[in-house]
Image: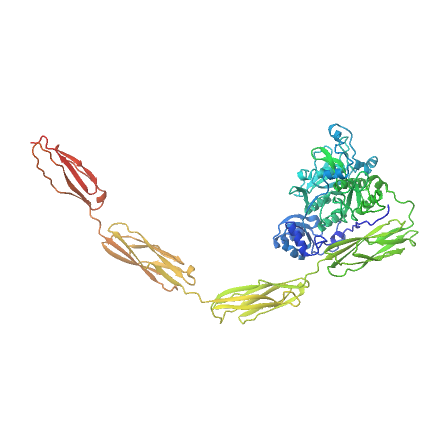
Amino acid sequence: MTSAPIRHRILILWLCLTIPVVVSQASAQSTAALQAAVAQSGGRVIVTLKSTRVLANPALMAPGAPAVSADELQQISTRLGSSYSAPVIRSLPATSMIVATIQPAQVAGLLADPNVAAVEPDRIWFAADVPASVGAAKHPRVATADPWAAYRTSPRADNVPWGVTQVTAPSVWASGNKGDGIKVGILDSGGDASHPDLAYAGGYDAINGNTINWNDDVASCNGHGTHIAGTIAAKDDGSGVVGVAPHVLLYAMKVFQDVGGQCGAYTSSQIAGLNWAVSQGIRLVNVSIAGSVSYAYDAAMQSAAASGTYVFAAAGNAGGAVTYPGSSAYAFGIGALDDTNNRASFSDFGPELDFSAPGVNIYSTLPGGVYGYKSGTSMATPHAVGVAALILSNNPSLTFDQLQQKLIDGALDVDAAGFDNNTGYGLVRAANSIAGGGGGGGTPSATLAVSPHSRNVSVQAGSAAPSDNAAITFSGSGAGSATWTATKRHNWTTLTVSTGTGNGNVSWSRSTAGLGYGPWVDTITVTSTGASGSPTYIIDSLTITVPPPPLALALSPSSRSTTVQQGGSAASSSGTVTLSGTGASSATWSATKRKSWTTLTAASGTGSGTVAWSRSASGLGVGTWVDTITVTSSGATGSPGTIIDTLVVTTAPPPLTLAVSPGSRLVAAQQGAAVPGDNASVTLSGTGASSTAWTASKRKSWTTLSIGSGSGSGTVTWARNAGGLGVGTWVDTITVSAVGAAGSPTVVYDSLVISAAPPPLTLAVNPGSRIVTVQQGGTAPGASATVTLTGTGASSAAWTATKRKSWTTLTTASGTGSGSVAWSRSATGLG
């Protein structure tokens, strides 16, 4: 097969630590654009952190080791969460990231933070399969009737789906290799652990961060993850289907969740799942998901590859440019073929595509113990993962680049000769890759090597980027006459020395024109016909960083104010001087004031600090007095800055005053009766009123003070006793005193009036006699008399009347209080 540029970089142990991510994606060339993207994501962001600690030798760090230690990540995330009121949703310590919610306006501040390497929206991605109707319409090879229905109704040997045969897996099985010992993870909707044709070694819920709920139960995902699992590793157990590598150790990493009725996955969930895969020693990860470019995801895949975990990603199904992460330099991008090895019409294509695999009408496992068809690059990717598992099972020590070369060696060229944008290097084939491919014969007379395999340079936006070079070295009998040529891929790279004979240097220049913030990666491919090691690659990374902020001066607060009484002492005050940006720590500042009543006590400094001053109200009249504290730092924006200082002088406080109200009290009582108590309000006003004590005294024996002291305003209370006092007016004086108070002492005159006891109860009847004359036999009239009760209790006293003779009848014989007694007479029988 004709050689073509390989876009993947040679992985250096510490490379992932030296390429900082500055802005979320290459197309976001301004903070404003990033703010808009953050707003669209609902404020949910991934923040990539960087350490401010100095490492003695970064090159000695382990492959894929995080740039920020666990304790430093905790400290930084706590500080950022507090400073920006940004709740941290989760931490991703393996890749030095946190997921948080922020306000879009906070983006610029975060990007300027010394511990922040990158900020990007935590976007939602979707599965890379196509509707069944699209697959059938575009690729009618499989009829609408299910040709494998019999496999679900009667026991038979395993069905080998056409795609499994197409990638030559059965030929590898014949040698005893079925992917044994290789751990394979599926970053998707989870897996059906109860399916009889699948055997999972474990799983992880990357949404919630546990190993409990990784079941494929999201209805909107339609069993996506379980279908992929069957293509990779359905068991060779005599029933159902069989996968490309049926003996691998299978893991489900659940990242999909229902988002508004769609099967969606956050970028952060995928990174969490990938980090978990690395921690478990999983060698291959299937990502049949399509989304937007993410430098955080790139960093996670780069770190994973350095640790021996390799990502295979679907190219996408829009029939256009390869989608991310299939387009990433740190993943193998896989396109879809039909059964005639033609590119599926829906399969994305372009220079980022690596390989192709069967992806149309793929029959595989589904949740619930059943089987079904799906089409898409989602279905092509697990075929490639299965092939890679068979290759790694044969040689587990392969690096990322070595595995890629094995896949190239065995690929079937199905489109234009050599690498092409439609199918990449062609159809992956397990047997051919393991056997060594169809490479040319003979022993090369020269061996080609380049050094170094990677170059990396960082430059601030707007600045010129330096040129670079790498050494070309030949060894062997034909070294002196071996010729070589170099090519590059991107327009920001210009080769200045691109050919040579024998040892030499390939050289190139870089241009930052039109490039936004972030890492930009090109591949310098060096080829020498007939030489061993040809082609070989140099990964050139150009990182565009945000220009350092200019020196800036800020003062806080912008005003100060204090109030003082005339003749009193005024409080001192201060303001914070903040210098930020380039050279802030060594920049000097000085302060001046304008008025005589202000004295600067801290008037200069280097770096951020405090300006302080005292105030004197001496000689100032009542009113508001204003001074301006001016702080200047040469060359700093915001300089000079001012703090408006206000001194309010008030009149002297009112003197302490005592008042008692009312000034007199009067009560009347009958001799021998109980007398009520009384009280008066004590009011203290002026300076110190609330803490000033007062006491009360009385003069006469018949008065007793029940509350005779207090602090601040209150009440003086007394009781009276009329026992032994005769009829008349008795006067006492209640005296209230407060030391230092005007109006002290003051008095309340208390008067007690004793009246005579009430008269006793008295009964009188009037008239004292009644007489009437009647003729014998005549009728005698009735009569009555007035009953009068006077004195104490007269109105409620009861009376009764009696008579002695039979000719008299009482008609009113009782009553209460004054009234009348009445009777009738009868002369019958009287002589």
- Horizontal and vertical percent position of residue 357: 79, 41
Hey, which residue is sitting farthest top in the picture?
154
Residue 591 in the image, given as x and y percentages of width and height = 60, 68
Q: Is residue 531 visible?
A: yes
Q: How is the image coloured?
A: rainbow
In this rendering, position of residue 500 left or right of residue 62: right
Q: Quadrant of the N terminus?
A: top right
- Determine the image quadrant of residue 704: bottom left
Number of callouts: 0
From the viewer's perspective, is residue 63 above or below residue 657?
above
Residue 737 visible, this orientation: no
Q: Residue at x 40, y 63 (%)?
A: 656
Residue 607, position as x, y percentages in the image: 64, 64
**Residue that appears at 60% across and 53% down:** 85
Q: Nearer the viewer, residue 717 or 113?
A: 113
Q: Residue at x 91, y 53 (%)?
A: 482
Q: Position of residue 116 (x, y in %)?
A: 68, 55
- Is 735 above or below relative to 405? below
The quarter of the rendered structure image containing the C terminus is top left
**In which quarter of the view is residue 250 placed?**
top right
Taking depth in this image into account, of 56 and 175 the one nearest to the observer is 175
